[in-house]
Image (spheres, rainbow, N blue to C red):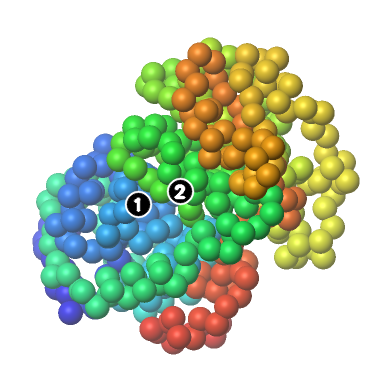
Amino acid sequence: QALFLFPSPTTYSVQSCNRPVLIYGAGIHLSHAEQLAVDFAHMAGIPVAPTWGALDLFPSDDPLVIGSFGTHGTRTGNFAVQNADFILSVGSRLDSKATGTPIESFAREAQITMVDIDQCEIDKFGSRVTGINEDAKAFLQRGGYSCVCPEWLAQIKVWKEKYPIVKPEYYEEEGVNPYVFIDELSKLVPEDTIICTDTGCAVAWVSQAWRWKKGQRFIHAFNQTPMGYGLPAAIGATYATGKTCVLITGDGSLMMSAGELITAQKLPIKIFMFNNQGHAMCRQTQREWLGGTYPSTSIEGGLKFPESWGGLARSCGFMSWSIQQMKDRRKIQIDASEAIQSALRYSGRPTFMEVMVSPDAEVIPKVKYGHPNEDGHPLIDISKEMLIPLWNG
């Protein structure tokens, strides 16, 4: 059992728990409390479940990092958060993407303490949470500690091994599995690189599978999720920092800001675009709820794209590559890892890589509306993973 001592503005409280989880959100960055947050977690010894806005705080190999959670999170992240008996959330408004629906199903056996600068975000939970209306940095500066729960950390490690995001069978698929591509790309992108994504499958695949390294910074519009945001964000981040920026986007999103390719013609931007011939995240929802008809989200449903994405990129000053499989067993064309390395190393011009993936490639797992977060699709038997009663709402 852990005794977690945490500070409120006026007093220190002792929380007895067996399965604590620390949630960090984008407020950590907004309050410039990144190192404080890392130190606080390590001092407390509590496993961390970051929201999308805090994924870059820790290297992925930090033993305290659980992984992303929520409607587009990992199974490990969701099993840990949903089974927790105490949650301390700092700098996250715990929106519906994090809590799932109905909100009553979220971490339903946990005592939740929520530190947020906006009292309205705390109030939306009513008596469900203990609220501390305070800036994240001010809260973390007072410190805290915990006796580590080795059994709980061991259980999280079991889930990680049992439910890998990048499954071994993905590597045997023909063509390009997007999870394998993200895994390979993240291994090759160096520290201190800015990672930008667009909305849709791109951000979900990155949030689930990216292997974060020290000094990397994740830029996304997060819960606003506008399509077309990624390229302008990458341009702005590059001008602001002078650093190389890697943009992971989709053909649907890039189509909405393709004119900005010409703006980026002399910047150190590396674009990796998933070409799934449409709006894949929307199509996944249409399969779930609308019987698999795809008006306005597919070429057959009326979408139009450039005849040659590579040609468009080259006309805007980019070096370009296109890959259709991860490994070329016949060695007719360059393997994906070699192409990625070439794109990342090239410094004379910005680079563009078109990554051909199946129009049916999905975010796995993904929680359907009305299901608790532990019940991600495709559905599996979760009875042995839940340490609390199954949701019967």
User: Which numbered marker is on residue 210?
Assistant: 2
Q: Which residue is mark 1?
A: 60
Q: Relative to residue 74, is residue 381 depicted above or below? A: below
Q: Depth check: 44 or 128 in front? A: 44
Residue type indicated by callout 1:
Ser
Q: Secondary structure at mark 1?
A: loop
In which quarter of the view is residue 354 placed?
top right
Q: Residue at x 30, y 66 (%)?
A: 21
Label pair 1/2, CB-CB below 8 angstroms: yes
Q: Tag 2 or tag 1, which sits nearer the N-term?
A: 1
Residue 52 relative to residue 127: left or right: right
Disc 1 crowd, CA 10 A, few/some/many (<14, 14-19, 20+): some
Position in image of residue 203 (x %, y %):
54, 46
Position in image of residue 288 (x %, y %):
73, 65
**Can you see residue 119?**
no
Position in image of residue 88 (x %, y %):
28, 62
Task: Name the outermost residue toward the front.
Answer: 330
Q: Secondary structure at mark 2?
A: loop
Disc 2 crowd, CA 10 A, few/some/many (<14, 14-19, 20+): many
